[in-house]
Image (cartoon, rainbow, N blue to C red):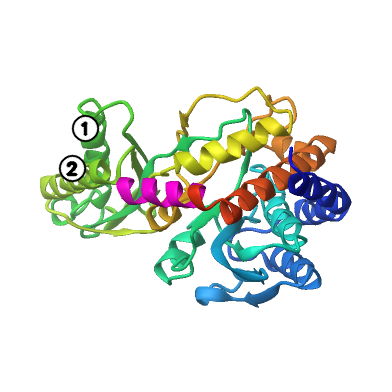
Amino acid sequence: MDAIKEFFRDQAQCLRQEVWELARQIGERPELGYKEYFASEVLCTYLRKQGFEVTQGIAGVETAFLARFSGTRPGPRIAYLAEYDALPGVGHGCGHNLIGAASAGAAVVLSKSLDLAGEVLVIGSPAEETSGAKVTLVKEGVFKDVDAAIMFHPGSQNVPVISSLALDALEFTFHGRAAHSVAATNFGINALDAVINFFVGINALKKQIPSDMKINGIITEGGTVPNIIPERAVARFYIRARKRKDLDELREKVIRCAEGAATMVSAQMTWQKFEFSYDEMHTNLALADCFTKNLREMGIHQIASPQTAMGSVDMGNVSRAVPAIHPYLTLGTGTEIPHTRDFAQAALSHEGESLVKLAMLTLALTGWDVLSDKKLMQQIKREFRAVK
């Protein structure tokens, strides 16, 4: 490891305790998406104290923020993504307290260089677990002049290269006509029957689509009392596919199922998206290779091959706007299951503290390579243009 990276290693060691304190505080006060007032304020206060210029409430999102630190001369602009929302009833069962702290810590480590070219950003992005504020941040141009976007996620393996599934969240409302379910059966139009028909059609559709396409739904409204024919029934679905193009085609098939189900009982149907749509994650391989190289320099050699996460992340939308990576790093033994209380406890343990330090330093070293290596930056951009 060269002298400048040894310098960053020393800086990370000096900052380790205060960055862990950020993770601990956020982890012990879990907040749901768009309500992360404490977490956002803690991170912003820390970054201001470290010399960053911080703007809160960006893109009309109250708990989002943008922190900037400019180098001594012009150069690329990299962004570290901070997440800090929790899961209802579970707390930080996805380890977002570690993500926010590590991204802030990595940016501060980089800011200690007296030979920093370009600009280091920390973008606070709320509500990843629900509607995904990164979608809004992309649409509002927050990433417009960013050259590379970087973050990490706690997981069960070290996986620098991931893809994810594109996601649409669809709500279908069936409109019928209420009537007494015995005395005026012929007068009523049963919206619940339409929903049931819809689910039967979806089950048939599932047998005709590839296994990597997913359709999962629930009935959220199905009537009020048994002796009144339901005039309104509502179902919500998540549909997923590996590619946005394939998902768009699947969405049309699902809508046609809903239309057919409504027609069968003479009901009406309307639909809408009840959450933001996520695009699939495109990992920039040149950037991921750089991250992997730095991970090996940290002594981490158990590195898994590229994987497709069987879920969806709003970082996918970022990856279509700028070169991006979303690597996973092992939390503890890797046996805790994400989205559980056990995972939340691990994220607040000594294992969580160790992971924050590893992630903070690996992210910082990767950021330095991007800012200081012109050939690497050209390679990252060339690959991004080709994929786009």
| Residue 150 on image: x %, y % | 56, 51
| Residue 82 on image: x %, y % | 63, 57
Residue 380 colored magenta? yes
Task: Identify residue for label 1.
Answer: 205
Give me the disc on residue 253: 2
Q: CA distance from mark 2 to mark 1?
A: 8 Å
Q: Amino acid at mark 2?
A: Lys
In the image, 257: left or right of 223? left
Residue 99 colored magenta? no
**Residue neighbourhood size for the residue with mark 1, other residues' Cα within 10 Å, grouped as few (<14), some (14–19), many (≥20):** some
Labels 2 and 1 touching (C-beta < 8 A)? yes
Residue displayed at 15% across by 50% down: 259
Considering depth in this image, is 232 or 324 the residue closer to the camera?
324
Q: Does the magenta stretch mainly form a helix, a strand or a loop?
A: helix
Considering depth in this image, is 254 or 365 the residue closer to the camera?
365
Considering depth in this image, is 64 or 48 the residue closer to the camera?
48
**Residue neighbourhood size for the residue with mark 2, other residues' Cα within 10 Å, grouped as few (<14), some (14–19), many (≥20):** some
Sequence-wise first label, 2 or 1: 1
Q: Is residue 58 above or below residue 270?
A: below
